[in-house]
Amino acid sequence: MANLSSPAASRGRLAVLGAGVVGLCTALEAQRHGYAVTLIDRNPPGTGASFGNAGYLATELIDPLATPATLASAPAMWLDPNGPLSLPLRYLPRALPWLTRFIRAAAPAAVAHSRAALTALNRAAVPAWQRCLDDIGATEQLVRSGYLLVWESPDKLEAARAHARSLAQQGIPTELLQGEALAAKEPALAERLSHALFFPNACRVRDPYQLSLCLLAAFEARGGQLLRQEIRNITPQAGRIQLETADGASFHAEQAIICTGAWSKALLQQVGLTVPLEAERGYHLTIEADHLTLNHPIGSAERRFVMSPLDSGLRVVGITEIGGLSLPPLARGFAALRHHSSQLLRHLADPSLKISEWMGHRPTLPDSLPVIDRHPSHPRLLFAFGNQHLGLTQAAVSAELVVSLLRGQPPAIDPAPFRVDRF
């Protein structure tokens, strides 16, 4: 049996399981506080859900996914062949327990609870990213881009105004744009749009995968170790955590943090915890076309998808598909994104464009809140996973919170809503 890392750091050996953006931020944050860290993942860092998002820090998304409005609109979205919601019929029996909890989470009291917790996390999200990137000398990775939430239908003008009032109550400023003001902000879309809300304080990253590689480089430059292995078994023991890989090798660390996203459920079952975690599948297109550059990330309020200008190309992201970890990607998801994006940007209908497709797995819990906690019976084992659509947005602040718990320090945000045993 071997140790995962050398005992060079003063606080001991720590294993961080999962090398997505949450795991990378957690590993770096632990290093800052004196831990010798080994980052473990079977896949290359940053290639899971962290790779596929729009790169936009969606701090205004403070409503949980489960609300009465969502439940009311779900059947129509599901039946629409280009709709944003998908649930393969063959997966429905397996999804029913999670869907039942999701429906319960739409109760008014539950929605208010989740909204308050999401608001607290999202308010702290960008400052946490700034601290993280300042520390590693990578502030150029964060772009204060602004964000446009757009409507095509003039009869939705009051909906935009109502949304702006709701956001203002939460301290989120917006500006209603129409006509020439909107055309000046985003000329490429002007002919298709009626109005938009502009979020002046919104940020994006230059490219999610590029960001992950930047975090990894800083982690390794500071002595962190990357272990490309699949962890099959995790066993808390007296004074340490034992980890066993898929090929039978055994390692131990003094403490461990599980940041394995949609794959966390099985590991928690091994340590006596059951969480209703679902793998919510997301789809994206990346379009290589310099002449199609947008000035801002764009969200369509009616079509429910996002387009974002990244260093790697124009990223088109959308589709919520409850489909687990095993099913292959469904052509419907990519077709819907092609349809909606070409409706807003007609040049995207050009068949000569080079377009890549991707599908990944978001870790989603029924109440839309992550797990950021310590095991109730095994204090050497901690968790940071389940950030649903907000993994990139909340990665740095989640890391700060879980490492505060690791250090035995009071977190800056009340961790009670994120307990692992809340279900």
Image (cartoon, grey):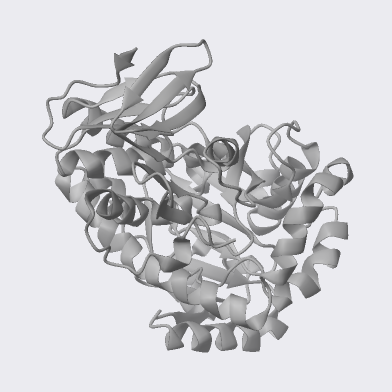
- Quadrant position of residue 85: bottom right
Q: Position of residue 138 (x, y in %)?
A: 21, 43
Residue reaching furthest to the front: 238
Nearest to the observer: residue 163 or residue 67: 67
Tell me: residue 271, above or below residue 67: above
What residue lies at 60% left-to-right and 82% top-to-bottom? 109
Q: Position of residue 312 (x, y in %)?
A: 45, 36
Q: Position of residue 53 (x, y in %)?
A: 52, 46
What residue lies at 50% left-to-right and 89% top-to-bottom? 165
Horizontal side of 375 relative to 334 (left or right) equals: left
Tell me: residue 163, above or below residue 220: below
Tell me: residue 191, above or below residue 156: above
Nearest to the observer: residue 78 or residue 197: 78
Q: Position of residue 327 (x, y in %)?
A: 76, 33
Nearest to the observer: residue 339 or residue 375: 375
- Quadrant position of residue 105: bottom right
Horizontal side of 322 relative to 129 (left or right) equals: right
What residue lies at 47% left-to-right and 41% top-to-bottom? 50
